[in-house]
Amino acid sequence: MLKKITLNAPPSKSVSHRALLAAGLAQGTSELENVLVSEDILRTRDCLAALGAVFSGTDSEPVVKGLGGRIKGPFLDPVKLDVGESGTTCRLLAAIVSAGQGSFEISGSGRMHQRPVKSLGQSLEGQNVRFKYLGLDGCPPVRIETSGLPGGLITVSLDESSQYLSGMLMAATMAGSSLVINIGGKKVVSWPYVNLTLQAMQRFGNPAQLQTLQEGQWRHADPDRIQHVEPGKIRFVVQPGVFSPVRYRVEGDFSNASYLLAAGAVGELPVEVCGLDLESRQGDRRILEILELMGAKVAATHDGVMVSPARLHGVDLDMGTCPDLVPTVAVVASMATGATRISNVAHLRIKESDRLAGVQQEVSRAGCRCRLTEDGLEMEPAELVRGGEVHFKTYGDHRMAMSLSLYELAGIRVSLDNPACVNKSFPGFWDEWKKVRRAYAGRGD
């Protein structure tokens, strides 16, 4: 009987962002547990501190004295908010500070100054908010001048990202009156992340109300029961109020656990990943379904979930709800038999890297036939370059680095140009990956 490899999922990055933001806006002191310690999360914390929230405790268990639902800054000398390369910090905070009073300047590094926020600025044009772009039109650095949201009605497009909506849901709690947020645009991407925002708002005591258009009438709906989201037929109503302080524990991260789970599918040893909640609202929980569709064996365990190897085959996937999984799935697909098609992920071109082009280049470097489509990838596995060393480019993208590491289990000696970029979201990745390497190195013991 094959032994198994036991690994630990890191805390959820998405939930950590939202917990910190809600605690930072709350009236009183919150105690957070199991917060991810990564570059992106520290950016969110530092930006909240610049706005006046007070932090004590440790990075993983911070005690947060919130702002009481009031954000103020001078109008002439803007509060400087450095979001680094964190798109989540940028987009959520841009919406949140728009509900304050004063002037706020958001800047970053890397590709952040090429990542658009114009859609959010356009949504807020009738809400006493002005976005002044200091570099490329529609991108950070951006100065946001605001006298506070009066409330009423706005429309938010989710064509590029669901983060605009997540930010506005939290910002709406600080509006002068109730705010109705309509969903516009042509499509909706990354919807499950909105559900995580709703969950955080509920836990911190100021829930948003979701409504769907049914027979010409707006009616209350349960977010957990929403299977299909169509622009123009869904909206949110948020009442002004202040978040309450709570004690909150962050759950394990399915996005960053995807590489560990995939190791059980493509290798020769089963992998158990501990610390995952199988009832989680995280959209990237879908990695379990995808690995099963491709032929892997997936089973719940007492501490999490175990993935066991099997003969893998190609699949046809719409990954619009779980775009962060694309690099993982693409690498797995390159080791399967038969074609795989990934669609509805055109917005991956505006991530930390052009993640679609990067994936196409690097899986091709490993030997897979892969081509870009209008909104995704088409892959036809071929003989991989096993037994030799392959120098892969990460493009400074944490998800590229972690997914490409899976090629070690295909007999490729993986060389990454920037292995440290995993610190953006999963600083402990290489410690967990060493457990995989040791398990295979010790198989002859």
Image: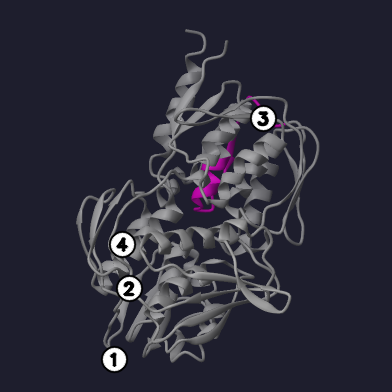
Q: CA distance from mark 4 to mark 1?
A: 24 Å
**Disc 3 designates what residue?**
296
Secondary structure of the residue carrying tag 4 is helix
Q: CA distance from mark 2 to mark 4?
A: 19 Å
**Disc 2 designates what residue?**
242
Q: Tell which tag, 4 or 1, sits nearer the viewer.
A: 4
Q: What percent of the width, then of the height, locates residue 383? A: 75, 31
Q: Residue at x 27, y 62 (%)?
A: 245
Q: Are marks 2 and 3 in contact (CB under 8 Å)?
A: no
Q: Tag 1 or tag 4, which sits nearer the N-term?
A: 4
Q: Quadrant of residue 71?
A: bottom left
* Mark 3: few/some/many CA within 10 Å (<14, 14-19, 20+): many
Residue type highlighted by circle 3 = Ala
Q: Tell which tag, 2 or 4, sits nearer the viewer.
A: 2
Q: CA distance from mark 4 to mark 3?
A: 39 Å
Q: Are marks 4 and 3 in contact (CB under 8 Å)?
A: no
Q: What percent of the width, then of the height, locates residue 153? A: 54, 86
Residue type highlighted by circle 2 = Val
**Disc 1 designates what residue?**
76
Q: Tag 1 or tag 2, which sits nearer the N-term?
A: 1
Front residue of 202 and 6: 202
| Left/right of residue 335 with respect to residue 6 in the rendered view | right
Q: Which residues are magenta?
A: 384-403
Q: Tag 3 or tag 4, which sits nearer the N-term?
A: 4
Queried whether the magenta region covers residue 333, the answer comes back as: no
Q: CA distance from mark 1 to mark 3?
A: 58 Å
Residue type highlighted by circle 1 = Leu
Q: Are marks 2 and 1 in contact (CB under 8 Å)?
A: no
